[in-house]
Image (spheres, rainbow, N blue to C red):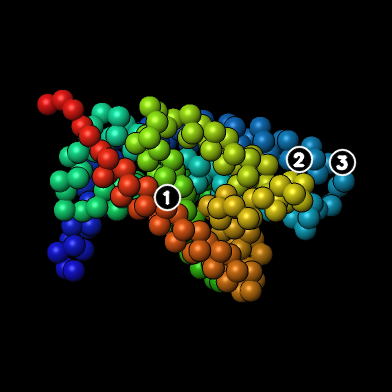
């Protein structure tokens, strides 16, 4: 057990050291997304201007603006795991990972998680500063922050295994990128990347909460904004259920594909 833990810690450490080289790229991406954010905020303001002082499904302009800032920070922090898995399989590099003492799925998970945490720390630092400049306040609630943190990390796990599962489709197709693009567009719509879930028609909200989309970070913002122990426990249980299902599916696909794997070349 201790040996295994040391191996996983080593993966996290190596991933962190390798990734710190690209800090300038991450800062540049944040700047691009900030410009996009400003445009969307003007769109939100136009919606609320129609009914001054009103709220939409119980959320004020300030609350949905906070949601947008938080969600955009998380979008920037996401690691492109589908492309990595797709490339590993297409190039045959997957064979090298099969020789590792650590299972490929968990190796990629810890490597990706390390990168995402590093990205998230930088992005949240930048975006919290932007949050204060736009709204002049950062609401704080101990329970809200704790609930937010747990759902945030759970959302990172949901997001990883969804995109990892799509990457594994490269075992069965020539290229899994088309599936990634399709899922990414659904992801953009159904987890509130641009349009907050409370703005959506009720049938789309139902789809978002029935699928894993809303549980990849959006529920974290909902709890941060309006903490309720009952709602938090519900979100946490639903998120945990989806994580277990996704991990099981990924292991099943990987186990089946590994049995049929044939790599030619030298």
Badge 2: how crowded within 10 Å, few (<14), some, or many (20+)?
A: some
Give the foreground label among 2 and 1: 1
Between tags 3 and 1, which lies in front? 1
Tell me what residue is drawn at x 77 percent, y 51 percent. Answer: 202
* Front residue of 91 and 135: 91
Q: Earlier in the sequence, mark 2 or mark 1?
A: 2
Q: Residue furthest left?
A: 266
Name the residue beneath numbered marker 3: 50
First in residue order: circle 2 vs circle 3: 2
Q: Secondary structure at mark 2?
A: helix
Q: Quarter holding the N terminus?
A: bottom left
Rounded to the nearest angstrom, the CA distance separating label 2 from label 3 is 9 Å
Q: Is residue 243 left or right of residue 220?
A: left
- Quadrant where the image shows the C terminus: top left
| Separation of residues labelled 3 and 1 (CA atoms) | 41 Å
Q: Which comes sooner in the sequence, label 3 or label 1?
A: 3
- Tell me residue 52's x, y (percent): 86, 47
Residue where numbered disc 1 is placed: 161
Q: Which residue is mark 2?
A: 45
> Around disc 1, counting alpha carbons within 10 Å, would you say few (fewer than 14), some (14 to 19), or many (20 or more)?
many
Residue farthest along the front direction in this orientation: 260
Side of 184 relative to 38 (left or right): left
Q: Nearer the viewer, residue 54 or 246?
A: 246
Q: Is residue 91 among the parts visible in the rendering?
A: yes
Above or below, comparing residue 165 to residue 155 in the picture: above
Q: Position of residue 45 (x, y in %)?
A: 76, 40
Q: Name which quarter of the figure residue 176 lies in.
A: top left
Label 1 residue SS: helix
């Amino acid at each position: 057990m201790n040996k295994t833990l040391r191996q996983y810690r080593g993966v996290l450490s190596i991933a962190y050291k390798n990734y710190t080289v690209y800090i300038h790229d991450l800062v540049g991406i944040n700047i691009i997304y900030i410009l996009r954010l400003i445009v969307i905020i003007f769109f939100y303001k136009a919606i609320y201007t129609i009914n001054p002082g009103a709220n939409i499904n119980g959320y004020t302009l300030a609350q949905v603006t906070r949601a947008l800032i938080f969600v955009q920070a998380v979008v920037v922090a996401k690691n492109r795991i589908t492309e990595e898995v797709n490339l590993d399989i297409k190039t045959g590099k997957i064979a090298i990972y099969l020789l590792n003492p650590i299972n490929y799925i968990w190796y990629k998970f810890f490597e990706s998680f390390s990168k995402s945490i590093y990205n998230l720390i930088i992005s949240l630092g930048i975006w919290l500063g932007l949050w204060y400049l736009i709204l002049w306040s950062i609401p704080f609630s101990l329970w809200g922050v704790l609930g937010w943190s747990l759902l945030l990390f759970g959302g990172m796990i949901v997001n990883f295994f969804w995109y990892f599962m799509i990457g594994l489709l490269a075992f069965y197709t020539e290229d899994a990128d088309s599936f990634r693009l399709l899922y990414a567009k659904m992801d953009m719509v159904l987890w509130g990347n641009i349009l907050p879930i409370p703005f959506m028609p009720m049938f789309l909200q139902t789809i978002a909460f029935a699928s894993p989309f809303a549980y990849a970070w959006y529920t974290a913002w909902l709890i941060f904004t309006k903490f309720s122990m009952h709602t938090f426990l519900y979100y946490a249980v639903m998120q945990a259920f989806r994580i277990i299902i996704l991990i099981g599916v990924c292991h099943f696909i990987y186990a089946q594909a590994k049995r049929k794997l044939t790599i030619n070349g030298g």
